[in-house]
């Protein structure tokens, strides 16, 4: 059995240089509850079909890394209790142990780059956690963004993180961050944060900047941030209450390491009585649409 298997549609698109959009699977198994996760992925596939872009969801089934999970494989990751959360360092372990695994942004980037793929859409990236100066909790997503060349579309980072430190880290490690039709770094549930980013107006400009990055020898990814559609925006003050509560519960329960992000996300859904879930789904679809447009421009 090969360690990596390419879905035949993805393989064909690679050979024919047709647009492909990479997606991660941790948001399916650890980021969203069932059945929302499965319904969302159906809609994501419909968007890709409508925009004539081949979706390449990356994940691990029985120890085989798959580039382009089909709906049945997605269902396994969406419903099964025992799906490992796989960041870059865990790829070898989970393959060796023949387990099912959902790849985070970091692992997804590593696999996508090995398959030569260039455009990746997700919800929010991991970042520097609040209190990282004592916990050292910094997502491996930032490391892989800094050492692999892709265009990654996200709605910024969740305010469960320290956005200022996350942006400082990205700057230090050479990751350019752009705002798509916004001059403010989006805070996932909220369209705006206190932090400024260069505003880029068109998909063509994004792709041109990425191509200039490559020509000038920049080896890191380009992080394109796309704010949630206006009708879903939740004000930062409202979110801050939920976030503080979720973080203090995590501290009380001593939840840390890989389990921290899924714990906080789950508690925020509960505390906001599902409102955060609606936002989460809306922004993922919005990022998939932008990702499809960027992919079409890149491969045109
Ligand atoms: N942020 C979200 N939703 C998610 C994640 C982050 O708003 O589902 C997932 C992504 O897969 C991301 C991962 O790559 O969490 C980061 O986890 P950690 O903080 O453990 O590196
Ligand atoms: Mn972490």
Image (cartoon, helix red, strand yellow):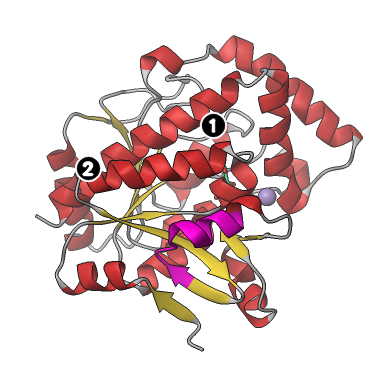
239 w.r.t. 115: above or below: above
Q: Magenta span covers which residues?
A: 66-77
Residue 11 appears in view: yes
Secondary element at image label 2: helix
Give how far apart the Cα atoms at labels 1 and 2 are.
Answer: 37 Å
Q: Which of disc 2 and disc 1 is earlier in sequence?
A: 2
Residue 270: % across, % down: 72, 24
Which residue appears at 54% of the width and 31% of the height?
Answer: 164
The residue mark sitting in front, 1 or 2, is: 2
Residue 194's mark? none
51 vs 164, left or right, is left
Q: Spot the residue most to the front.
A: 72
Residue 203: % across, % down: 18, 38
Q: Is residue 70 magenta?
A: yes
User: In the figure, residue 119 lies in which quadrant?
Assistant: bottom left
Residue 153 appears in view: no
Residue 263: % across, % down: 74, 39
- Say which residue label 1 marks: 164
- Say which residue label 2 marks: 50
């Amino acid at each position: 059995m090969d360690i990596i298997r390419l879905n035949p549609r993805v393989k064909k698109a690679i050979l024919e240089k047709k647009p492909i959009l990479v997606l991660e699977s941790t948001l399916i198994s650890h980021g969203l509850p069932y059945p929302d996760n499965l319904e969302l992925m159906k809609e994501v596939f419909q968007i890709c079909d409508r925009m004539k872009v081949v979706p390449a969801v990356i994940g691990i089934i029985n120890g085989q890394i798959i580039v382009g999970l089909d709906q049945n494989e997605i269902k396994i990751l969406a419903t099964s209790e025992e799906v490992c959360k796989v960041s870059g360092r865990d790829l070898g372990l989970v393959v060796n142990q023949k387990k099912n695994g959902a790849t985070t942004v970091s692992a997804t980037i590593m696999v996508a780059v090995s398959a030569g793929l260039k455009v990746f859409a997700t919800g929010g990236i991991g970042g520097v956690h609040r209190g990282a100066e004592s916990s050292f909790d910094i997502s491996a997503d930032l490391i892989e963004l800094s050492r692999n060349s892709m265009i990654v579309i996200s709605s910024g980072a969740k305010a469960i993180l320290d956005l200022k430190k996350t942006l400082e880290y990205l700057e230090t490690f050479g990751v350019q961050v752009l705002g798509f039709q916004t001059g403010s770094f989006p805070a996932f549930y909220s369209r705006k944060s206190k932090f400024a980013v260069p505003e880029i107006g068109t998909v063509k400009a994004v792709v041109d900047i990425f191509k200039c990055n490559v020509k000038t020898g920049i080896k890191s990814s380009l992080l394109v941030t796309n704010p949630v559609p206006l009708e879903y925006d939740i004000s930062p003050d409202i979110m801050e209450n939920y976030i503080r509560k979720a973080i203090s519960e995590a501290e009380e329960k001593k939840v840390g390491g890989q389990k921290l992000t899924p714990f906080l996300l789950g508690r925020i859904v509960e505390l906001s009585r599902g409102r955060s879930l609606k936002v989460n789904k809306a922004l993922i679809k919005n990022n998939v649409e932008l990702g499809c447009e960027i992919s079409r421009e890149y491969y045109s």
